[in-house]
Image: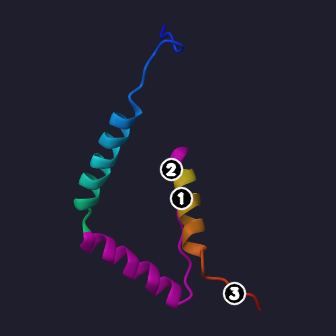
Amino acid sequence: MTDKKNSQIDFESYLSSYLLETIRVSKNIDKVAVGKILDALFKAWREEKNVFLAGNGGSATIAMHFTTDLGKGTYSDG
């Protein structure tokens, strides 16, 4: 069992590693594929189509968050 009171975590080192990994992953994103997804979503919005997202467990939560993000800025009063 870990003694939580006496354990030390080097948060600065952890954060540095995390940020370096985030940069590495970001540089390797397939921009063409992302562009195709954005084009399809924009086309669906322009043609007033529905977009369905699904997931199971944690993936369902990610789908719900993405759905919320898609809706931001798409509604207006009146």
Alpha carbons under labels 1 and 2: distance apart: 6 Å
Q: Nearer the viewer, residue 30 or 24?
A: 24
Left or right, 76 with reference to 62: right
| Residue 56 location (% of width, % of height) | 53, 48
Membership of 48 in magenta stretch: yes
Residue at (69, 87) in percent of width and height: 76
Q: Residue drawn at (44%, 86%), measured in percent from left and top?
A: 43
Q: Neighbour class for label 2 at 10 Å: few (<14), some, many (≥20)? A: few
Amino acid carrying label 1: it is: Ala
Q: Which residues are magenta?
A: 31-58
- The image quarter containing residue 52 is bottom right
Give yes or no for contact between labels 3 and 1 (Cβ–Cβ under 8 Å). Answer: no
Mark 2 or 3, closer to the camera:
3
Quadrant where the C terminus is found in the figure: bottom right
Asked whether 13 or 41 is in front, the reply is: 13
Magenta: main secondary structure? helix
Q: In the displayed structure, would residue 50 be above or below residue 56? A: below
- Residue 70 picture location, percent across and down: 54, 72
Query: Which residue occupies the foreground of this view, 3 or 36?
Result: 3
Total numbered circles: 3
What is the three-letter code of the residue carrying label 2? Ser
- Secondary element at tag 2: helix
Q: Which residue is mark 3?
A: 76
- Circle 1 is placed at which residue position? 63
